[in-house]
Amino acid sequence: MEEEIINRVAQSQLVTFDLEDYYPKGERKILDVSEWLYEGIILREKEFRAHVEAHDWLKYQDTYVAITCTSEAIIPGWAFMLVASRLQPFAKKAVVGGLVDLETSLYQSIIENLDVSEFADKPVIIKGCSRKPVPENAYIMAMVKIQSVAKSVMYGEACSSVPLFKKNK
């Protein structure tokens, strides 16, 4: 007589938290201000402002924008602020930095507003593999937020998880 195979994972209280489920939909764009610098390294205010005024801001409608400078130039803070002020009516969000900085900022907002009450006193696995560009900082933010209520927190998949936290009894 054959024994019935029992899926203990499906029967457990184990809850899987997948950061990909919270990935904000929308196009990501990089705006490189080095193209607006004299010889790619010197910010001349009058010329910079002329580039800002002439730029087609409409192409950033409903996008997430990383404002960066790929040259070795030192850019004063006001320049990034000026660019952000022009993006404000169009972009969903703008940050200074690269795409990882942008994704981290997006996830920070999401995780700060996340209701973790469903994880109260339960074992939770933070799913590890992702097909979308989930930044490593998002995993840390999720860990800290979920740990505050969970019975335990693991990382990975149910079949091969790494224990990270267990609440003291």
Image (spheres, rainbow, N blue to C red):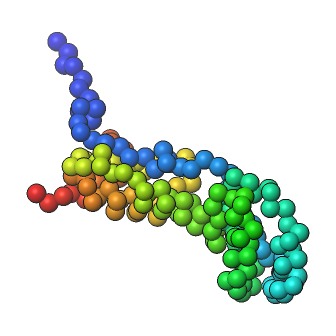
Circle count: 0
Left or right, 19 with respect to 97, comes to left
Query: As displayed, is residue 59 above or below residue 157?
Result: below
Q: Residue at x 88, y 82 (%)?
A: 47
Q: Quadrant of the C terminus?
A: bottom left
Left or right, 41 with respect to 140, comes to right
Q: Quadrant of the N terminus?
A: top left
Q: Quadrant of residue 13?
A: top left
Find the residue positioned furthest to the front: 89
Q: Quadrant of residue 88?
A: bottom right
Find residue 103 and report its horizontal and vertical position in percent: 57, 60
Left or right, 71 with respect to 136, comes to right
- Residue 160 visible in the shown view: no
Q: Residue at x 54, y 59 (%)?
A: 106
Query: As displayed, is residue 74 above or below residue 148?
Result: below
Q: Quadrant of residue 153?
A: bottom left
- Residue 43 visible in the shown view: yes
Query: As displayed, is residue 24 above or below residue 41?
Result: above
53 or 106: nearer the viewer? 53
Q: Residue at x 38, y 46 (%)?
A: 17
Find residue 98 and report its horizontal and vertical position in percent: 64, 68
Find residue 116 and report its horizontal and vertical position in percent: 33, 51
37 or 53: nearer the viewer? 53
Find residue 57 and report its horizontal and vertical position in percent: 80, 61
Q: Residue at x 23, y 36 (%)?
A: 12
Find the residue positioned furthest to the top: 1
